[in-house]
Image (cartoon, rainbow, N blue to C red):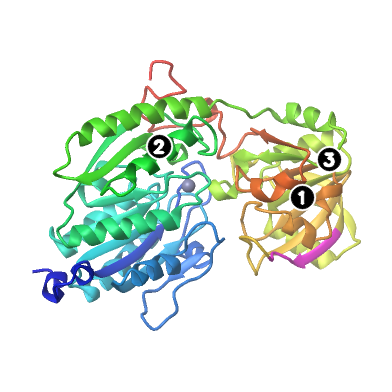
Amino acid sequence: LPPCRQRKAGSQEEDLFMRVFSAMMDHESNKFSPIPTTEENFREVDYFSGNQNEPLPDAGDGMILNYGGFVRMIRAAGHEVYAGPAYGAQPSGPLVRADYERMRAHILAHLRKATPVDAVMLYLHGAQLAYGYDDCEGDLLGCIREVVGPEVVISALLDLHGNLTDAMLQHSDILIACKEYPHTDYAMRTADLIRLTAKAVAGEFKPIMKRQYIPMIGTFHTSEEPLRGLVDRVLEMELGEDLSVSFMHGFQWSDTGNVGCNALVVADERATQVSALASEMADAFESAGKAVAAPFWVSIDEAIDAARSVDRGPVIIADIADNAGGGAPGDSTFILQALIERGVENAAFGMIWDPIAVEIATKAGAGAIFPMRIGGKIGKMSGMPIDAEVEVLSVKKCMTGFMTHPDDDCAAVRIGGVDVVLNSVRTQVFAPAPFEALGIDVSSKKIVVVKSSQHFYAAFAPLASRIIYCDSPGSLSSDYSMLPFENLRRPMWPLDVDA
Ligand SMILES: [Zn+2]
């Protein structure tokens, strides 16, 4: 008998007590990123060794639940948790094979120590790759199933940008993805996961999972109708029911045969019409997704023309294809080159990831004027480096505030009419803080270029006169016909009309 049954003392509450092993493996891997991911990259963000005497990691941006928060929620629901290792890193290329295997081994070693358990609850992504593994989540879940056997309930929280695979479904009992993009509902989905897992452990709920694949790729903001209405409809449908419906948007830049969207339904095995519900939800998501994914971004020249024609600044131009938050290097120069060539005045540009340029600027100090080479170093999709005479405006360990890094050495340099922020710890722009810390007042600028896809929006929208999503070339380009896909299933919307 599982331990929960042995502990059962009659009351309803204690019926639902479970002993849980938890772990986190969270990485969105972009096959077009030229930066391989190592264990060291996880240490920079969210890292817990599994040592029960150490505090749980508490870093995070306040929007997406961190591992400490995940474990505390399970404990607050009255369950006992052995908190196993946690690894979360900034999106980048696939993991170095030996590092993935070492982290997986750590998780399994702690799991063996923790057994017997009633449930394994994982915090995963769904689009993690390592060299030699095109489905790290499916692989990890399979290894965990081998350790705990068929009776223990295995459940996991996913990012909706995961690519759902057969192995993930085969080796787990309950998978629940966040429903919102931006991901504002991690805590709510964790609550769903805890409730359904506890009921499954107690035998009150026998989960089955049905999914329907949709051959579609794109970026689908859930704030936009008709997708907003569909997500609300699902939330209402789940109320008071032992039911979970996830729409997995997929992560096309993983370039595996699993890329695409999925509707996933978790329901009780006694429920009827579960497959029908999955296919109804897939149809609804396909039509809502196609409606909101209509391309609304513009070329570099169009973006600069539009920004110059506005009377009042700042116009925010989002460099969506070079977003470090999606695995891009963050050192592409396409837009900066165009700003310089076109003689644009009163502009700010951030942030170019170039630790060497930062070091040179720091040694030269504020006020120094000299020729410098900036950006365009990491790969083909970074473009060419910029060689220009720069004036160093300021240098600082400056990244305080929202999703920034305390060790990030930064510099601001002026090239013609453009103030450029350079940084040394790769990250996207979430807020004006990095500009302000270096003395650049973004609200007084005519044009501000930020390397980010969407997470910049909340902090910049209130001060912007206009926001333009610019599709420059890059590792996260939304012009899918330009990406060197090798493994994508075809036909696939919107690349093939017959998808
Ligand atoms: Zn995501």
Q: Is residue 281 left or right of residue 378?
A: left
Q: Type of residue at label 2?
A: Arg
Q: x, y percentage for residue 126? A: 37, 48
Q: Nearer the viewer, mark 3 or mark 2?
A: 2
Q: Which residues are magenta?
A: 393-400
Q: Nearer the viewer, mark 1 or mark 3?
A: 3
- Say if 408 sits above or below 178 in the image: below
Q: CA distance from mark 1 to mark 3?
A: 29 Å
Residue under label 3, please give it.
313
- Say if 137 sits above or below 289 in the image: below
Q: In front: 301, or 82?
A: 82
> Pointer 3 and pointer 2: residues touching (CB < 8 Å)?
no
Crowd around label 2: few <14 · some 14–19 · many ≥20 (10 Å): few
State which tag comes first along the sequence, 1 or 2.
2
State which tag comes first along the sequence, 1 or 3.
3
Quarter placement of the C terminus: top left
Q: CA distance from mark 1 to mark 2?
A: 52 Å
Residue 190 seen in the figure: yes
Q: x, y percentage for residue 38? A: 46, 60
Residue under label 1, please give it.
373
- Element carrying mark 3: loop
Q: Is residue 227 left or right of residue 445?
A: left
Q: Nearer the viewer, mark 1 or mark 2?
A: 2
What secondary structure is the magenta-colored segment mainly?
strand
